[in-house]
Image (cartoon, rainbow, N blue to C red):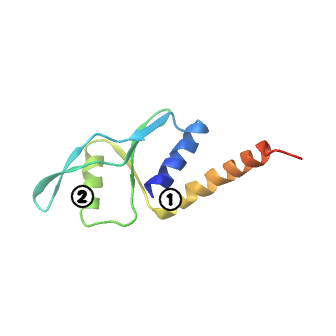
């Protein structure tokens, strides 16, 4: 799923919808089961006016809501991309990609 997200992020960058994206290296503290733990969102994405973190999830684990709430409570923006969101982005990306492929396809 993360590979799919990378393709989408690259295409959004090509379309100039986002300014940049990268694998996230910044860890955040959160509490789960009375223990302090760390959370590393998958990506950081810079839009023209806001920076967001993106978490790509195939399924939600018991501690995920605590991680997400903690990150948001610390003032950060977070999007969780599940399969349905990836599919919606892929439809957009593939429509643009197919149009570009048709326009640049060799003739003759």
Q: Which residue is mark 2?
A: 66
- Could you tell me which residue is drawn at 68 percent across and 48 percent down? 96
User: SS of the residue at dot 1?
Assistant: helix
Cβ atoms at labels 2 and 1 below 8 Å apart: no
**Image quadrant containing the N terminus:** bottom left
Near-viewer residue (49 or 59)? 59
Q: Which residue is mark 1?
A: 85
Furthest toward the front, the residue is 108
Relative placement, left or right, of 89 versus 49 is right
How far from the left and from the top, in percent, is residue 6? 49, 48
Near-viewer residue (74 or 87)? 87
- Could you tell me which residue is drawn at 25 percent across and 67 percent down? 62
Q: Is residue 45 visible?
A: no
How far from the left and from the top, in percent, is residue 71? 28, 47
User: SS of the residue at dot 2?
Assistant: helix
Furthest toward the left, the residue is 34
How far from the left and from the top, in percent, is residue 9? 51, 45
Q: Quadrant of residue 13?
A: top right
- Could you tell me which residue is drawn at 65 percent across and 53 percent down? 94
Relative placement, left or right, of 38 versus 80 is left
Q: Is residue 99 visible?
A: yes
Q: Quadrant of residue 87?
A: bottom right
Q: CA distance from mark 2 to mark 1?
A: 21 Å
Seen in the picture, residue 94 relative to 104 is either above or below; the reply is: below
Near-viewer residue (28 or 6)? 6
């Amino acid at each position: 799923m993360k590979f799919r997200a990378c393709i989408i992020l690259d295409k959004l960058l090509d379309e100039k919808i986002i300014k940049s994206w990268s694998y996230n290296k910044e860890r955040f503290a959160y509490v789960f089961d009375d223990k302090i733990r760390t959370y590393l969102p998958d990506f950081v994405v810079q839009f023209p006016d806001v920076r967001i973190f993106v978490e790509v999830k195939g399924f939600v684990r018991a501690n995920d809501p605590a991680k997400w709430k903690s990150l948001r409570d610390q003032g950060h923006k977070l999007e969780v991309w599940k399969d349905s969101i990836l599919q919606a982005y892929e439809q957009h990306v593939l429509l643009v990609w197919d149009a570009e492929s048709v326009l640049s396809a060799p003739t003759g």
